[in-house]
Amino acid sequence: MVRQVVAGRKVGELEVMVLQELWASPTPLAPHELIDRLPGKKRAYTTVMTILKRLIDKGLVERTAQGRTFVYEAAGNRDQLTARAICQLLTSANDPRAVLAHLVKDFNDPELVDELQDVLSRIDKL
């Protein structure tokens, strides 16, 4: 089984496939819609529901009641989910500012530093 990391969470191959379908959809999807869209062999309803529950538990998917059923959507795109994971880590740090400073310094990307400075200057103007 091939595992990937999405927003700091290890996810399996089928979890990634479900996330990709949710990201590609302009609207939330019901489980039966996901089953029809997943590539490869047709998955059992219970299998898809298990995957959705795991993704909800990992904070990667949200569900909403729609009539007598639930629909599912990604809790954000890859970048938004990663940003949320970083924010959660920062709130657990003793000194979030020091963590951010180390992150930027250790990443060693001058273009990123320039972009961050631009963002910070726009925030200061608000």
Image: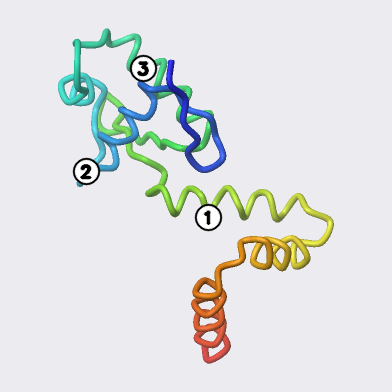
Residue to which mark 1 is pinned: 83
The part of the image, by quadrant, that contains residue 68 is top left
- Of all residues, the one furthest to the right in this rendering is 94
Q: Looking at the picture, how far across and down is residue 112, in whole percent?
A: 52, 71
Secondary structure under tag 3 reads helix
Which disc is residue 49 wearing?
3
Q: Which of marks 1 and 3 is nearer the N terminus?
A: 3
Q: Mark 2 points at which residue?
A: 27
Instruction: Please state if 52 lies on the left or on the right of 68 as rendered.
Output: right
Q: Which of marks 2 and 1 is nearer the N terminus?
A: 2
Q: Earlier in the sequence, mark 2 or mark 3?
A: 2
Q: Is mark 2 on a helix, strand or loop?
A: loop
Dot 1: element: helix
State if disc 1 and disc 2 touch (CB < 8 Å). Answer: no
Q: In this view, does 84 lie above or below 97?
A: above
* Residue 106 % position (x, y): 67, 61
Q: Where is residue 108 in the image (x, y as percent from the top left)?
A: 61, 66
Give the number of callouts.
Answer: 3
